Image (spheres, rainbow, N blue to C red):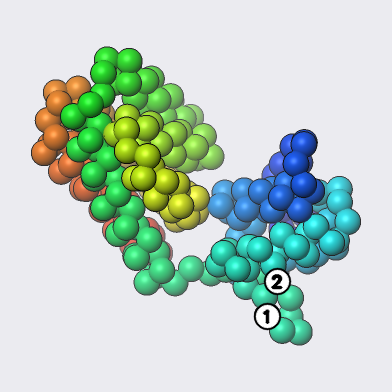
């Protein structure tokens, strides 16, 4: 393992086409949100450039952009480091997520048809299989897809845009507790599907609010267990 701490196979391929700096940015952001690059980890431009097969310039540009967005800290005379979120930062983000997703659940219950409900059930089955196989990365990705589907079924473009702004940070916070949440998270997803299928807006709101609150509490309690 190199000093950047990247596991074998963790480096994503740079998709073409598109400006190189944007592709490097997306690759580094994916490594951060999946925690292949851990909070507090030193990011060495030359090593990242070598991993990604590019020059240092697009890496430097990507790190500057990630710094502006709060993913990376640039420290004078020390270099770049993956940002370490404070408990307060996580709490604020996950609280906003609860507000957005509870409203999305209510709207989904009001408008979702049979095809949408079937899609949720399929995602839930895939998520349950990922948990059973102890596939944490798969479970995290499927959790994100499940919540994105709820947002899609809500049919509110503004709400979806706001949710998209916090989605990657939700994944960042969810990854370290995904195994702990495990099967219980998908039980809660099943309860949500039942409420949406019953067109019970109040119940869907209640279930989603409790579901996201469980994740928030688990994140804060993660180092106590």
Query: As rendered, which of 63 and 212 lies closer to the eye?
Result: 63
Query: As rendered, which of 80 and 158 lies closer to the eye?
Result: 158
State the CA–CA distance, disc 1 to disc 2.
6 Å
Determine which residue is flagged by label 2.
Answer: 80
Q: Earlier in the sequence, mark 1 or mark 2?
A: 1
Quarter of the view holding residue 183: top left
Residue 21 vs 86, above or below: the answer is: above
Quarter of the view holding residue 152: top left
The residue at 67%/75% (across/down) is 74
Quarter of the view holding residue 42: bottom right
Residue 195 vs 211, above or below: the answer is: above
Decide if residue 89 is in sight here.
yes
Residues under numbered marks 1 and 2 in contact, where contact means CB atoms less than 8 Å apart: yes
State left or right for residue 85 relative to residue 224: right
The residue at 15%/26% (across/down) is 199
The residue at 42%/46% (across/down) is 161
Number of other residues with Cα within 10 Å of mark 1, as a class: few under 14, some 14 to 19, many 20 or more = few
State left or right for residue 89 relative to residue 108: right
State left or right for residue 182 relative to residue 187: right
Decide if residue 143 is in sight here.
no
| Secondary structure found at label 2 | strand
Determine which residue is flagged by label 1.
Answer: 75
| Secondary structure found at label 1 | strand
């Amino acid at each position: 393992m190199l000093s950047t701490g990247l596991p074998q196979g963790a480096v994503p391929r740079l998709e073409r086409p598109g400006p190189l700096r944007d592709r490097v940015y997306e690759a580094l952001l994916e490594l951060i949100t999946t925690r292949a690059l851990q909070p507090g980890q030193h990011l060495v431009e030359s090593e990242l450039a070598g991993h990604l097969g590019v020059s240092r310039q697009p890496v430097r540009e990507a790190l500057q952009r990630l710094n502006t967005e709060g993913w990376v800290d640039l420290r004078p005379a020390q270099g770049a480091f993956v940002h370490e979120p404070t408990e307060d930062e996580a709490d604020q983000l996950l609280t906003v997520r609860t507000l957005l997703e509870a409203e999305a659940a209510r709207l989904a219950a009001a408008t979702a048809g049979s095809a949408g409900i079937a899609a949720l059930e399929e995602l839930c089955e895939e998520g349950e299989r990922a948990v059973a196989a102890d596939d944490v990365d798969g479970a995290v990705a499927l959790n994100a897809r499940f919540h994105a589907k709820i947002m899609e079924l809500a049919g509110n473009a503004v709400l979806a845009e706001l949710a998209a702004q916090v989605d990657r940070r939700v994944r960042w916070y969810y990854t370290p507790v995904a195994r702990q949440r495990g099967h219980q998270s998908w039980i809660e997803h099943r309860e949500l599907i039942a409420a949406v299928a019953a067109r019970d807006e109040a119940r869907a709101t209640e279930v989603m609010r409790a579901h996201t609150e469980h994740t928030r509490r688990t994140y804060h309690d993660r180092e106590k267990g």
